């Protein structure tokens, strides 16, 4: 073998090893994001079962969702700044360890309040998972492919959201064999253990910035980032509304079983799985602003359709509305996350990722609590089990008309911002 041939062989081997390493890193970070989104969505489908198991009202079992989202909201910025200072990999390992412990506690909870406490701990772990999946993914891509990376995370997040209702509904339906609602927490443990092993073995170690780099929030929160965070709140509230209101409307308003409800709710996230990567590619090709506008337009239309179509033609109307709403969310997510990371120093990526998580989680809490309260107001009672189908339908209509109005506000925020890229092109 000649020297030239040996050289080519060595380069090919190094390239192959590099691709395998990148694939391993991507798989690890995708699994971390999957766990965080699965933890958010899988408990929603169990709310009726929890209300029955603990003889609790809707607001009481709703705390199982809100506790997770609340602690995740409080923790994301702290997690991001800790990652910038002490190292992203070390903090991801800490988050996975906490997530595993909290999942075990949730599965073994003997009372509703113990379950709520365990879910609060799980939310802290999820904050670390979500924050560092995004921050570490940003480290692995070049500037020309940021949109695709954000689109991939959007796809994985959608996969977790899809698995939550469908898998949860199946496990709850198999109560005799699998332990009912407890199984939705047991199933998260092996996935998190696997993610922890991959993180330790595959992710490269890196040093945090320590005290040498300032990660002041004010150095990151500027006029470019703040609108992205505000819009993120509004959109997340609308998407969470579909997860909280959906189970009650489909089961009580349309009379579907738990399995049928889970499958119907999974349709939108399944669409997201296939639209995430194309959305990211569009951002790389067109830029974030036009894709953001298209995504928000589809979200507004989809929410408006949810207010009327399901009440008119039933499950097909619900599905048709999701076909409009879901691609809009993926377009929005890829474009908004890409825009948020523009012009950000590497030493601030953990903090920016945390801020994105903070805004998203504030929106999720608003969707679970405020929009849930609007739904209850529209129904006329918090005791949904004793409400008739027409009352559930009224609550559905009011809730998603409100959701459509929120997206219109988000569109106004986008239009109020100057297109800095367009200005730069004019000056070139």
Image: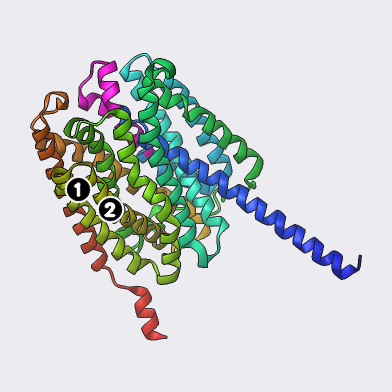
In the structure shown, which secondary structural element does the residue marked by tag 2 occupy?
A: helix
Percent from the top left, x then y, of residue 266?
A: 35, 41
In front of the other: 106 or 251: 251
Residue linked to disc 1: 306
Few, some or many C-alpha atoms within 10 Å of disc 2 (few <14, some 14-19, many ≥20)?
Answer: many
Could you say which quadrant of the image residue 115 lies in?
Answer: top left
Question: In the displayed structure, does residue 70 sit left or right of residue 201?
Answer: left
Marker count (numbered):
2
| Residue 96 is inside the magenta segment | no
Q: Position of residue 370 (x, y in %)?
A: 19, 39
Q: Residue at x 50, y 43 (%)?
A: 82
For mark 1, give the secondary structure: helix
Q: Are marks 2 and 1 in contact (CB under 8 Å)?
A: yes
Disc 2: which residue = 325
Instruction: Evaluate whether residue 240 shows in this view.
Output: yes
Image point (71%, 60%), residue name: 15
Foreground residue among 230 and 274: 274
Q: Is residue 167 left or right of residue 302?
A: right
Mark 2 or 1 closer to N-term? 1
Task: Report the disc number at residue 245.
Answer: none
Which region shows up in magenta?
Answer: 47-72
Report the predominant secondary structure element of the magenta stretch. helix
Q: Relative to residue 165, is residue 404 depicted above or below? A: below
Residue 230 seen from this side: no
Can residue 70 be found in the magenta stretch?
Answer: yes
């Amino acid at each position: 073998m000649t020297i030239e041939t040996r050289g080519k062989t060595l380069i090919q081997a190094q390239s192959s090893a590099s691709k395998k390493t990148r694939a391993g890193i991507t798989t690890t970070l995708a699994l971390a994001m999957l766990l965080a989104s699965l933890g958010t969505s899988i408990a929603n489908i169990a709310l009726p079962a929890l209300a029955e198991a603990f003889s609790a009202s809707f607001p009481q079992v709703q705390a199982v969702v809100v506790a997770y989202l609340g602690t995740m909201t409080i923790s994301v910025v702290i997690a991001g700044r800790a990652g910038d200072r002490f190292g992203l990999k070390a903090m991801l390992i800490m988050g996975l360890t906490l997530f595993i412990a909290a999942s075990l506690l949730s599965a073994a909870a003997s009372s509703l309040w113990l379950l709520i406490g365990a879910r609060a701990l799980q939310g802290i772990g999820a904050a670390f998972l979500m924050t560092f999946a995004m921050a570490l993914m940003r480290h692995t891509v070049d500037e020309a492919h940021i949109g695709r990376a954000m689109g991939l995370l959007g796809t994985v997040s959608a996969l977790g959201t899809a698995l939550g209702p469908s898998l949860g509904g199946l496990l709850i339906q198999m109560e005799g064999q699998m332990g009912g609602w407890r199984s939705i927490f047991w199933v998260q443990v092996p996935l998190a253990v696997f993610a922890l092993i991959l993180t330790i073995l595959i992710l490269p170690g890196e040093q945090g910035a320590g005290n040498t780099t300032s990660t002041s929030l004010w150095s990151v929160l500027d006029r470019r980032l703040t609108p992205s965070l505000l819009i993120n709140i509004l959109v997340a509230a609308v998407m969470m509304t579909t997860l909280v209101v959906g189970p009650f409307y489909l089961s009580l308003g349309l009379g579907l079983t738990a399995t049928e409800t889970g499958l119907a709710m999974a349709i939108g996230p399944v669409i997201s799985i296939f639209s995430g990567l194309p959305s990211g590619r569009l951002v790389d090709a067109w830029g974030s602003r036009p894709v953001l506008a298209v995504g928000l337009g589809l979200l507004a239309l989809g929410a408006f359709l949810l207010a009327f179509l399901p009440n008119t033609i039933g499950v097909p109307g619900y599905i048709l509305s999701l076909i409009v709403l879901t691609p809009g969310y993926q377009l929005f997510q890829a474009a908004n996350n890409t825009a948020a990371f523009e012009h950000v120093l590497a030493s601030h990526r953990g903090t920016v990722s945390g801020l994105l998580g903070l805004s998203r989680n504030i929106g999720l809490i608003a969707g679970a609590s405020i929009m849930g309260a609007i739904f209850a107001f529209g129904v006329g009672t918090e005791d949904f089990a004793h409400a008739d189908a027409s009352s559930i339908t009224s609550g559905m209509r009011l809730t998603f008309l409100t959701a459509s109005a929120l997206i219109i506000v988000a569109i106004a925020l986008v239009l109020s911002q100057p297109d800095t890229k367009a200005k730069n092109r004019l000056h070139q």
